[in-house]
Image: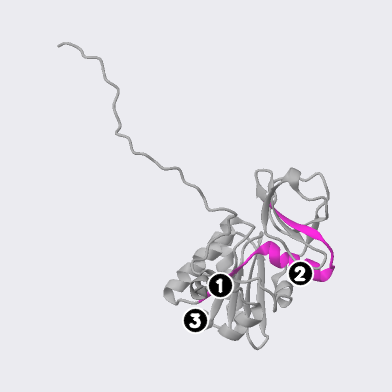
Amino acid sequence: MDFSALQTKLPAPMPALRQLLAAHGHLLVLDAASTVVQTGVLTTAGQTAWKRQEGEAGTTLFTCAEAVLAQAGLPLDQIGAFVYCEGPGSMLGVRTAALSLRTWNVLKPRPVFAYQSLAVAARAEWQRAPRAFTMIADARRDTWHALAVAVDGRTGTLQRTATADLPAEELVTPEKFRAWSQLARPVRPCGYDLGGIMAGLLDGDFFRPVAEPDAFQHEAPEYKKWSAQVHRAATAPHHAR
């Protein structure tokens, strides 16, 4: 059997943050999944710079990115790779970050790596207090993004779950994430400060290489086929002259 063809179909490995730093040097992190926009610069020398600001992503993301680059003393051209949150979270914020990266990569192409907000938040929360729980975020229409975390810290696959189907175990949600649905049971908030979270992600498969940055979706959107029809005006009654 020819295994070479099979190997080409395997998904690309997900590098750890330590590997990204070693390969690309300076990383620019963008996260607009919550109401607090966060940007950061990470370097191989262990230097970090972070900026957090609450505001509308369309403007705040760029002012924060400019501020954190100035704080790190680096121009955008010296960034070796981009890291961004693909969600779940604010769809507008995530897509603003993704569009920014696409634009910057037109000027100078660089590798882009995506991570999921609930995965990194769950990792930080489990490191703080090891136990089993489910990390959730509102997905609208009485459904929730849900990520199960086992006692040993292993996580399952991110699911979209109806309110009635949420597990009976402890529910945790990142702070500053928008929520529209209400739950009848308590939900424990957890921190979502990327400066602290990223420090605990040097090892582990949290970062996925992406060719075209976009927002995470559980399934691809479906579009109904549109059939063009010739417009026919209503027939007016004929009046004899």
The quarter holding residue 33 reads bottom right
The quarter holding residue 79 reads bottom right
Residue at the far left in the pictured view: 241
Q: Which residue is mark 2?
A: 124
Residue 65 pos. (x, y %) = 58, 72
User: Which amino acid lies under the numbered mark 3 shown in the image of this protein?
Assistant: Asp
Residue at the far top in the pictured view: 240
Residue ID at (68%, 60%): 157
Name the N-terminal-most of marks 3 and 2.
3
- Give the answer, above or below, for where 59 lies relative to 106: above
Residue 52 pos. (x, y %) = 67, 69
Pair 1/3: label in front:
1
Give the distance between the C-alpha atoms of the residues marked 1 and 3, in whole angstroms: 26 Å
Residue ID at (34%, 38%): 228
Name the N-terminal-most of marks 1 and 2.
1
Residue stretch rendered in magenta on the structure: 111-138
User: Which type of secondary structure does the marked residue at label 1 adopt?
Assistant: loop
- Give the answer, above or below, for where 42 lies relative to 185: below
Task: Please state which of residues 3 and 103 is positioned toward the viewer in this rendering.
Answer: 3
Residue 1 pos. (x, y %) = 51, 73
Pair 3/2: label in front:
2
Task: Please state which of residues 222 and 73 is positioned toward the viewer in this rendering.
Answer: 222
How many neighbours does mark 3 have within 10 angstroms: few (below 14), some (14-19), or many (20 or more)? few
Residue at the far front in the pictured view: 1
Label of residue 12 in the image = 1
Task: Locate the C terminus and report the quarter of the image it occupies.
Answer: top left
Q: Which residue is mark 3?
A: 77
User: Which type of secondary structure does the marked residue at label 3 adopt?
Assistant: helix
How many neighbours does mark 2 have within 10 angstroms: few (below 14), some (14-19), or many (20 or more)? many
Name the N-terminal-most of marks 1 and 3.
1
Colour treatment of the image: one colour
Give the distance between the C-alpha atoms of the residues marked 1 and 2, in whole angstroms: 25 Å
